[in-house]
Image: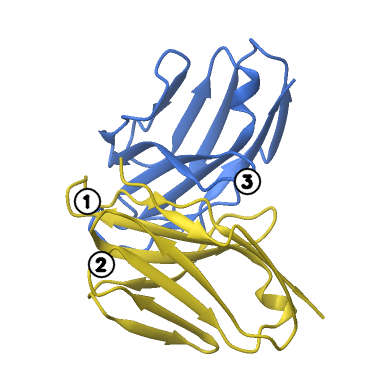
Chain colours: A blue, B yellow
Amino acid sequence: EAGVAQSPRYKIIEKRQSVAFWCNPISGHATLYWYQQILGQGPKLLIQFQNNGVVDDSQLPKDRFSAERLKGVDSTLKIQPAKLEDSAVYLCASSLNRVSGNTIYFGEGSWLTVV
Amino acid sequence: TQLLEQSPQFLSIQEGENLTVYCNSSSVFSSLQWYRQEPGEGPVLLVTVVTGGEVKKLKRLTFQFGDARKDSSLHITAAQPGDTGLYLCAGVSRRTNAGKSTFGDGTTLTVKP
């Protein structure tokens, strides 16, 4: 079974530039998550989708971050304009549904460095 | 905001030693999960505990959920270099959106051969 796919794997941009990350979840998984993991910290949930609807985006900095999952499958996360503090690993994850205790499968992450 | 505190933050031991890491919160969780994350990869689920007082074993790893469902521990017996990694706990609160996991900042374990 294919895992969660993410791209690009690594990205270096200058501050104030924009960047987009793509995620393809495990086939059949209705719930998709984007997490931000800053070095030395645990993952922090940015946004959670159930199919193509947003369930939770309370910690998404909406002035610069946006995400969509138009057809309920793939998702993109965009940052515009980027700030130095956005340097982090952006982890996409998916699960069958949003039942508590469901296994969440993570991708390898997209590493962003803002200089 | 439900905060999960993990301790110790860093742990370096010799192969063959035993260790315990902790995950504590003031919040009650409906379930708690432990993940291991290796450098350059995403976290991988090790176990989910649901019932207060529950103990689960996975080979040399023993996971315990506190009676009050606010804390958990992970004990590793006879650690091996392959156990090296970042151990993360994540809790799902009864009061939050189902399926949303709040992560601690992890314990970085290094097992030296």
* A78 is higher (above) or lower (below) than B66: above
Specify the subunit that label 3 lies on. A
Quarter residue A61 falls in: top left
**Rendered residue at 72%/15% (across/down):** A14
Tag in front: 2 or 1 = 2
Please state which amino acid type lies under the numbered disc 2. Answer: Arg
Residue A31's spot in the image, x, y percent?
A: 32, 48
Residue B61's spot in the image, x, y percent?
A: 51, 83
Residue A72 shown left or right of residue B36 in the figure: left
Specify the subunit that label 2 lies on. B
Q: Earlier in the sequence, mark 2 or mark 1?
A: 2
Q: Are marks 1 and 3 in contact (CB under 8 Å)?
A: no
Q: Nearer the viewer, residue A66 or B11?
A: B11
Q: Nearer the viewer, residue A57 or B21?
A: B21
* A78 is higher (above) or lower (below) than B45: above
Q: Residues within 10 Å of mark 3 (few under 14, many from 20)?
A: few
Q: Decide if residue A2 is in sight here.
A: no
Q: Are marks 1 and 3 on the same chain?
A: no
**Rendered residue at 82%/81% (across/down):** B113
Q: Residues within 10 Å of mark 2 (few under 14, many from 20)?
A: many
Secondary structure at badge 3 equals loop
Q: Which mark is residue B98?
A: 1
Residue A21's spot in the image, x, y percent?
A: 56, 32
* A22 is higher (above) or lower (below) than B10: above
Identify the residue position indicated by label 3 in the image: A40
**Rendered residue at 59%/26% (across/down):** A86
Q: CA distance from mark 1 to mark 3?
A: 26 Å
Tag in front: 1 or 3 = 3
Residue B77 shown left or right of residue B12 in the figure: left
Identify the residue position indicated by label 2 in the image: B69
